[in-house]
Image (tube, rainbow, N blue to C red):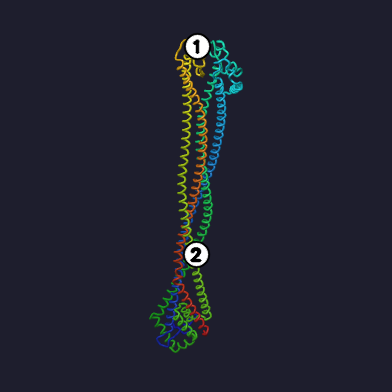
Amino acid sequence: MKTTAATFAAFILPGQSLKFLESASSSPVDEVVTLLGELKTNIEADGVTEQTSYDKFACWCEDSLAKKAEDITTSKNSIEELRTRIVKLGGELGSHGAEITQLGKDIAQNKESQKEATEIREKESEAYEAEKSESEQCIGALEAAVGVLKGAGTKPGFLATIEQAQLLSVVAGVRGLLHVPAVEKSVSADDMQVVREFVDDPSTFVSGKPVSAVQVASKHKNPYGDYAPRSTQIQGILKEMYGSFAKDLERANVEEAKKQKGFEELMVTKRQELATLELTLKTHKSDKATKGKELADGKVELQDTLAQLEADEAFFTDTKQSCSGKAQEWAQRTRMRTEELVGINQAVAILSSDEAKATFANATSNNGTNATGFMQLESEVAPSQGRTRAYSKLKQLAGRYSNLEIAKLAVRVKTGGHFDQIMVMIDNMIARCREEGKQDIEERDWCEAQQGKNTNDIADLNRDITKAGNDITRMQGEVTDLDGKLTTIEGDINTTKQDQTDLQSMRVGEQAAFAQGVKDDTKAIELLETAIRHLARHYNAFVQLDNSTDPDTPPEVAWRGTYNKREGEGKGVVAILTLIKENLEKEINVARQADAEAQVAYENDRQALDTLLRAQTKKEVALEKEKADLGLKIVDRQEFETQKGDDLLAEQNKTSALQTNCAWVASHFDTRRTKRQTEIQGLIDAKNYLAGVDSD
């Protein structure tokens, strides 16, 4: 095949120039091979640049997709946990609601039971006081009647010795007893009839008028029948009534004390139960409020997490598609570049073979063309002197500034690029460099701002954690102090309760001792009266005897005869026995008065202990409430401390991330700025030079 200069020129790439050496060994084919080698180098350099860029992009895809996949998994797990937690909190809130409703009913029932017990106790106490007042009035009336009637019927004209007003008072007091139900229960119908006769006509009982044996027998089966002063009879009936009322009153006092003790113990139990119920109700309400807030926060967090998951999944899908498309594009570019390089290699191999060289040499020889002819071609297609000088200058500037971009511009000038386009490229490079500088400054400022904020946040979090810890320690100390106070008040309450028990036991013992003493004294009086009666028969002594224990005993008579016994000594003994009997009677009255005073003192002491116990219980409840409030505050501060600890850990992790991501500011920012300024200055110099060079 014969190749002419015109044919060869047709295969030259646009903008390319041929430089033919005057040496006979150099040919246009050799220059083509050289140009192909340079083209191959440029293509390979572009491949390296693009490979670096794609590797960076592929690394970002891998990291972003992996991180986003991890975020999606975390979000799904969080959503599942939040839904489970929301369901659980809903159930717990329902449980708290039911508990609160039930506790409200229990508290209302407790208060109602206290009210009912108090009302019942007040009614019982009112009934007791009424019965006690009535019994004491009856006892007083009976005691006065018995005292007035002593000695009646033993002397003629005894009625004259009794004041009329006193007798009328006694009769009025006894008349008032006839309508008391307890009187009808304590005496027989016959005795009640005698009492009514006494009330209707008291003179027949104190005048000393004898009654017939028939009259006496019709009442009490008197075996004697010749003389029976009715004052003795009425005294016996009244004394029997007196004893019955005294025993009923003592029994009522004991029963009242037992009922009061049972009521007080019941009220203490109910109050403690009420305090426990109210404290439990408050705890449930607090837990319900806390869990209600947790439920609301959980629902908000669930919605946020669902929205974040949707955004993450959309980003993951878009990024995956983008990365996949870019990978396909890169594969196609790599394949096309590889095919291009293969074609160039094949062309170089073909043109550089010995056979090709011989062929081209023969073609040149057959055309009769020598080197001089090729030199003529060179003059027709050779580049301008201005382009050559620009290439050399740009190459020189690239070496001076070590700037790859200027070197690329030199190649572009050499391969025929238009100066205007190259200057536009230079302007774009300068603008890009300045934009990169601006981005570096923005990233540096962002790093400094974030690192400063991170440092301040860590300091604030450490301060909050320290303060929370101090608050927790302080409140725990207050809880310890409250425990000590609670222990003390519990001891005081136990002491007060023991004092109540001891006081009650002591009072019951006193009442039992009083009842036993009255019983013993009454029995002793009965024995003394029996002895006195027997002695009086022999020593003609004048005595006033209480025949209530033996109402059928006839009155003694004073015999006057010749029989002379030791009447003086006998009378003295009778007098002593009478004095002893009277002392015992006085002792019974004193004992009754002392027992009444002891009862008043007991009631006062019991009321004081009740007041003290209520105050102590109220203080205990207040301390328990204060302790519970402190417990809630401690839990809140602990949660706050934990949250701040988590925030601190996040900020510390952020510190590490910032140190990693912003380390280039300290190590490379100034170097990058210096190199960039150098690069910009080189580009400016290249632009200025090209502006003064003619590209024609």
Q: Position of residue 508 (x, y in %)?
A: 48, 31
Which label belongs to residue 678? none
- The type of residue carrying mark 1 is Arg
Q: Is residue 502 above or below residue 527?
A: below
Residue farthest toward the bottom in the current orientation of the protein? 372
Is residue 205 something one can see in this rendering? Answer: no
As drawn, 78 above or below 150: below
Within the image, what quadrant is residue 353 found in? bottom left
According to the picture, the residue beneath numbered tag 1 turns out to be: 560
Asked if residue 432 can be seen in this view, the reply is yes
Mark 1 vs 2, N-terminal side = 2
Most foreground residue, 618 or 337: 618
User: Which numbered disc, 1 or 2, marks the residue closer to the eye?
Assistant: 1
> Percent from the top left, x then y, of residue 13?
48, 79
Q: Position of residue 340 (x, y in %)?
A: 45, 74
How far, Cα to Cα, is label 1 from label 2?
132 Å
In terms of depth relative to the viewer, which is nearer, 285 or 531?
Answer: 531
Name the residue type under label 2.
Answer: Lys
- Image position, residue 320 (x, y; %): 48, 62
Quarter where residue 171 is shown: top right
From the image, which quarter does the N terminus lie in?
bottom left
Disc tally is 2
Counting other residues with Cα less than 10 Å from the Cα at mark 1, is it few (<14), some (14-19), or many (20 or more)?
few
Comparing 285 with 117, the one in front is: 117
Callout 2 secondary element: helix
Residue 453's label in the rendered image is: 2
Give the SS element for disc 1: loop
For image coordinates 56% across by 10% down, the residue present is 212
